[in-house]
Amino acid sequence: MIELVWPYLLLLAPLPLLIRLLLPARRAQQAALMVPDVGHFRPDGGHAEGGGRRRWPWRLITLWLIWLALLGAAARPQWTGDPVSLPTTGRDLMLAVDISGSMGTEDMQLGNRLVNRLTVVKNVVSEFVEERQGDRVGLILFGTNAYLQAPLTFDLASVNRLLTEAPVGIAGGKTAIGDAIGLAVKRLRQRPAGDRVLILLTDGANNVGEVGPDKAAELAAVEDIRIYTIGVGAEAMRMPSIFGVFSSGIVNPSAELDEETLQAIADATGGRYFRAENTERLVEIYDLIDAMEPIEQEAETFRPIAALYYWPLGAAWLLTLGLMAFDLRTRHA
């Protein structure tokens, strides 16, 4: 259906007529002072009155059409479509992804390539997000500071794009796990209880921030928010020598991963802790999380809206150009 956002503007339609009726004396006086002889302004050069009378209604009708078209555009006509149901499963998923400097450690494989941790996370999480049709998904990126990169939304493509464009270390080199959880709680508490989920992925330990992970987990538990924590990073990596070849020395690149705290966060909120040592394990973890039973909630609908103001505005513009062209042609004839 077509409707007007500001229909009361159409009440101004008789305004030019009212002005003409209220100011007749002034108009006559101005015409007498400025144009003493109006004969030359008639279509026939002042020799026949019939031509002038035939021209005047045509010009008057055109001016009225221009005025009405402008009013129609100002009233903001729009087309409103039929209600469209949004697919909803009842889950609000907030993803908190660590992008601190340590996520640049190249200890994981993607295909046959040795890549850093964040590259693997982006690939796995992107596929996970693409399958979340019907879920609201939000994104928090954290390092030294935690930032809401995308609020809870059905626009999964935008969430994916914001994740894939995030570089390592842009949020700082340290890890503020507690702040990330606190920010997620602030956003998720606005949603209906029972369907709030936070998936937090990190490769380190909380070493900065205003809120401790244990306190943040308590706040999440009070708000009935389940937190699934994932510790990512290989458990063994062969270090290269100064000559560019791999030595026999093997180190644990995930030595700083605080699994005890991540486990405590999951336990306090009714979630679960997962350990992702490689790409395959990370895929399995997200498959397990995907198997969570959705909670039913009321379906949401929206009505598509398309603006139509440019049609009457374009008509007014064309009529004005036509009237100007006709006047120029008449004047030089």
Image (spheres, grey):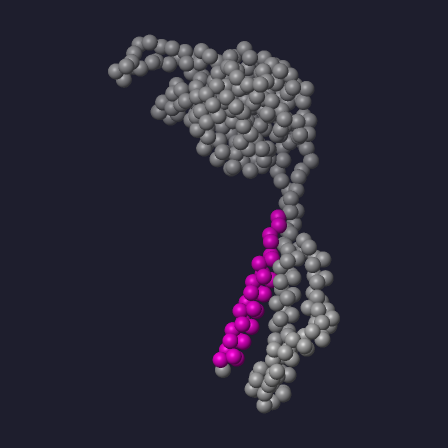
Whether residue 121 can be seen here? no
Q: Answer above or below: position of 19 versus 190.
A: below
Whether residue 209 can be seen here? yes
The number of numbered discs placed on residues in the rendered structure image is: 0
The residue drawn where x is 62% and y is 15% is 215
Relative depth, front residue between 126 and 288: 126
**From this viewpoint, which residue is outermost toward the left?**
243
Magenta residue span: 304-332
Residue 82 x %, y %: 65, 50
**From this viewpoint, which residue is outermost toward the top?**
249
Q: Answer above or below: position of 259 versus 303.
A: above
Relative depth, front residue between 125 and 59: 59
Left or right: where 145 falls relative to 242: right
Relative depth, front residue between 6 and 139: 6
The residue drawn where x is 65% and y is 75% is 30
Residue 190 x %, y %: 66, 30
The residue drawn where x is 70% and y is 63% is 12
| Predominant SS of the magenta segment | helix
> In which quadrant of the rendered view does residue 302 lie?
top right
Q: Answer above or below: position of 249 versus 158.
A: above
Residue 113 x %, y %: 35, 25
